[in-house]
Image (cartoon, rainbow, N blue to C red):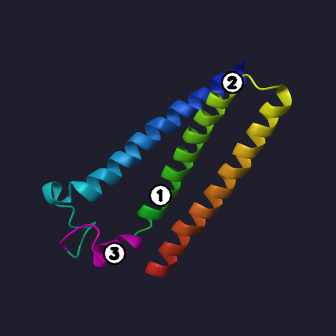
Amino acid sequence: MMRDQKLWSWHVAAGIVILLLLGLHMTIMHLDATLKFTSLNPAGGEPIDWANVAARGKMLFFPITYVLLLSAALFHGLYGLRNILFELDPGAGLKSAISVILIVSGLGLLVLGTWSAVASFDLAR
């Protein structure tokens, strides 16, 4: 029971992290014309112009926030999926299998995404 409360608290915290980091991303990428983030888009023009993408790729802030966002999104989504599947009331063995599959796939996706963020940071330098 206590474990479920702890996991649910982490689920809610991950949702808040997603809200904050995705809000930051949307602000940087889509409110650039309004807020004038010249330090994040030094080449001017659109945030998706290659010069701006390359400039942001050199900043350590972005890979860190990408990995944090990915971590929060994976936990939030996979824990939510686990809860939905557990609502179907599978047997104990199937519950264990579901948990193991979701943990292994989540960790694999996290490793792949982290590698991608670090590799793109190294390429930009």
| Residue under numbered circle 1 | 66
Q: Residue at x 27, y 74 (%)?
A: 49
Residue on which the image places disc 3: 55
Mark number, residue 3 = none
C-alpha separation, residue under disc 3 versus residue under disc 2 = 48 Å
Residue 91 higher or lower than 42, as above or below: above
Indicate the position of residue 115 as horizontal and vertical percent values. 60, 67
- Which of pointers 2 and 1 lies earlier in the amino acid sequence? 1
Residue in front for this viewpoint, 122 or 106: 106
Q: Residues within 10 Å of mark 2 (few under 14, many from 20)?
A: few
Outermost residue, right side = 93
Q: Which residue is mark 2?
A: 88
Q: Which residues are the magenta region?
A: 44-58
Residue 5 rendering spot, x and y as whole percentages: 64, 22
Residue plotted at (82% across, 25% down): 91
Does residue 125 appear in this view? no
CA separation, marks 2 and 1? 33 Å
Residue at 66% from the left image edge and 34% from the top image edge: 82
Q: Which quarter of the rendering shows the N terminus?
A: top right
Q: Quadrant of residue 7?
A: top right
Seen at 69% across and 24% down, the residue is: 88
Residue type for callout 2: Leu
Splitting the image into 4 quarters, where does residue 59 fall? bottom left
Q: Residues within 10 Å of mark 1 (few under 14, many from 20)?
A: some
- Residue 55 within the segment the image draws in magenta: yes
Query: Which label sits in the foreground, 3 or 2?
Result: 2
Q: Which quadrant, please, contains the C terminus?
A: bottom left
101 displayed left or right of 30 = right
Considering the numbered disc 2 on the image, is that residue within a helix, a strand or a loop? loop
